[in-house]
Image: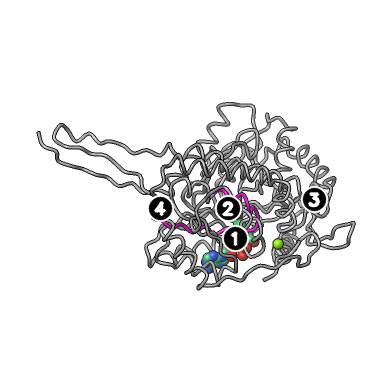
């Protein structure tokens, strides 16, 4: 198969189109390697992960260029993703030997305790928007917990998962513990999810494919962790630090050209400051430098021609329904080459709460503005979609911030800095955004099983 450079809109490299036979071979390898890997002392597993982190840092320039080329994202963002992947391996290297069980108070004549076991062979279905970060986020805790791994990167962006596996091998990970099968969702992803020896599937991607994955995993009663998109609100109260809020929103919706599951795609803003904030956002949107990712622009292309047409269709719908487009709204090309799959940074004002651009994930650089008059209305708007991944809140009022954090239906709330946090903070969604938590110590639990032992030992 071919993988494309979205900044030029042309194929630049080929890779293997894996199928069910490759999946079978990978699962066999994982089963064989898992017998020893699961018994390895957690601290020893941690040492290998620490060496992998160091190798990721050593290879960072190469990884970042390849990630930028394969996905289209600006090089500076790819560098951030690579640093984040190294940090993920460091975190789980240190956490590997913190997994510990309990003892249970059954009384004098009994002994009760738990054993934490690896979940077994784990599958990781990875999307194209954060190829290396998402791979690292699943693979590092799975390995730390003693699981074996089969990763299926997205067909649009297979390269860095392959490089990561190579680095893990160099770090001393035994053969067969981490496998990568490239290919399409249908040919490689579905057989992997359906394979009866796979005991856990981590899936990040669209809701529809997540539902398919859940159904495909059901016959083998394989557990799934689903991280599916969002329509995340950024609430700005009237007393907020406007500079910080504007900066936060620009990153929340224009980073990676808005192709972020946790993008802040809805601006829920107090009508008293709506005019000022929106005009500053329009100015920022129009001044972003646009170009091929490797030229270090502030704003890069969309990942594929399919994604470009999906985003364009969403915006066309808004235009047809008479919504107010404050800026952007059209596909464009790299001004220097006349090529690539770009879409203008776009802001749609005063969208009704039931409009499709408010309700549906666009997964592109399209900010939808929803003004409110009262705090109750802000909360209702924030919670008014089927998604519940993350939310942002900007205010100087401590109590108001934490009331909103309490009442918003989302897996994670950022206060006064969108995307605040790191690998330490559990991440995942509510409602149609999915279930299960990645990152943090929660991820180690996701890749483990608890065995309880209760013994009568006599008096
Ligand atoms: P997708 O959800 O179909 O693809 C994600 C991954 O799943 C890829 O690796 C793909 O090969 C794999 N896959 C597809 N069908 C599969 C199946 N039946 N069994 C196992 N694996 C399968 O998403 P797609 O088509 O790339 O994008 C469609 C929309 O999904 C986007 O427009 C965007 O709205 C959303 N999306 C959300 C992401 C997120 O981070 N939440 C990431 C990527 C896409
Ligand atoms: Mg590509």
Q: Which residue is drawn at 51% across and 61% down?
A: 210
Q: Which residue lies furthest to the right in this view?
A: 336
Q: Which of marks 4 and 2 is nearer the N terminus?
A: 4
Q: Earlier in the sequence, mark 4 or mark 3?
A: 4
Q: Which of 57 and 435 is in front in this view?
A: 57
Is residue 7 toward the left or the right of residue 96 in the image?
right
Contact, mark 4 vs mark 2 (Cβ under 8 Å): no
Contact, mark 1 vs mark 2 (Cβ under 8 Å): yes
- Residue 410 visible here: no
Q: How is the image coloured?
A: one colour
Question: Disc 1 marks which residue?
Answer: 153
Q: Which dot marks residue 326?
A: 3
- Mark 3: which secondary structure? strand
The residues colored magenta run 118-137
Q: Nearer the viewer, residue 376 or 107?
A: 107
User: Between tags 4 and 1, which lies in front?
Assistant: 4
Question: Considering the image in quadrants, where does the N terminus appear?
Answer: bottom right
Label 2 CB-ligand 1 distance < 8 A:
no
- Spatial CA distance of label 1 from label 3 is 37 Å
- Spatial CA distance of label 2 from label 3 is 37 Å
User: Between tags 4 and 2, which lies in front?
Assistant: 4
Q: Which dot marks residue 36?
A: 4
- Provide residue 234's location: percent of width, then percent of height: 64, 42
- Provide residue 89's location: percent of width, then percent of height: 56, 43
- Provide residue 237's location: percent of width, then percent of height: 65, 34
Is residue 110 toward the left or the right of residue 232 in the image?
left
Question: Disc 2 marks which residue?
Answer: 135
Question: Considering the image in quadrants, where does the C terminus appear?
Answer: top left
């Amino acid at each position: 198969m071919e993988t494309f450079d979205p900044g030029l809109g042309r194929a630049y490299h080929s890779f293997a189109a894996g199928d069910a036979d490759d999946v079978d071979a990978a699962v066999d390898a994982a089963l064989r390697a898992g017998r020893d890997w699961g018994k390895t002392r957690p601290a020893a597993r941690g040492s290998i992960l620490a060496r992998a982190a160091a190798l990721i840092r050593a290879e960072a320039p190469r990884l970042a260029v390849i990630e930028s080329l394969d996905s289209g994202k600006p090089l500076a963002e790819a560098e951030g993703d690579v640093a984040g992947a190294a940090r993920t391996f460091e975190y789980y290297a240190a956490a590997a030997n913190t997994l510990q069980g309990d003892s249970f108070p059954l009384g004098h004549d009994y002994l009760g305790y738990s054993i934490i076991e690896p979940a077994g062979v784990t599958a990781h279905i990875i999307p194209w928007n954060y190829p290396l970060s998402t791979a690292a986020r699943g693979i590092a805790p799975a390995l730390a917990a003693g699981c074996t791994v089969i990763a299926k990167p997205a067909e649009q962006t297979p390269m860095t998962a392959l490089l990561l596996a190579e680095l893990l091998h160099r770090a001393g990970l035994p053969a067969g513990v981490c496998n990568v099968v490239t290919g399409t969702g249908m040919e490689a992803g579905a057989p992997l999810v359906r394979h009866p020896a796979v005991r856990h599937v981590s899936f990040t991607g669209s809701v529809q494919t997540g539902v398919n994955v859940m159904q495909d995993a059901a016959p083998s009663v394989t557990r799934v962790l689903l991280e599916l998109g969002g329509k995340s609100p950024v609430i700005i109260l009237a007393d907020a630090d406007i500079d910080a809020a504007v900066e936060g929103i620009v990153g929340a919706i224009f980073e990676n050209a808005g192709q972020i599951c946790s993008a802040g795609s809805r601006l829920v803003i107090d009508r008293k400051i709506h005019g000022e904030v929106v005009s500053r956002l329009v100015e920022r949107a129009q001044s972003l430098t646009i170009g091929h990712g490797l030229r270090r622009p502030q704003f890069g292309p969309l990942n594929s021609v399919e994604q470009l047409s999906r985003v364009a269709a969403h915006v066309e719908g808004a235009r047809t329904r008479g919504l107010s487009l404050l800026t952007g709204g059209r596909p464009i090309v790299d001004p220097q080459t006349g090529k690539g799959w770009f879409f203008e940074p776009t802001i749609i004002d005063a969208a009704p709460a039931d409009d499709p651009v408010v309700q549906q994930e666009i997964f592109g650089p399209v900010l939808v503005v929803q003004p409110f008059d009262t705090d109750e209305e802000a909360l209702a708007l924030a919670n008014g979609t089927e998604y519940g991944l993350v939310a942002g809140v900007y205010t100087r009022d401590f109590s108001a911030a934490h009331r909103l954090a309490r009442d918003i239906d989302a897996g994670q709330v950022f206060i006064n800095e969108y995307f605040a946090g790191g690998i330490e903070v559990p991440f995942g969604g509510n409602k149609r955004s999915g279930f299960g938590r990645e990152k943090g110590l929660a991820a180690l639990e996701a890749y483990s099983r608890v065995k309880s032992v209760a013994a009568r030992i006599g008096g």
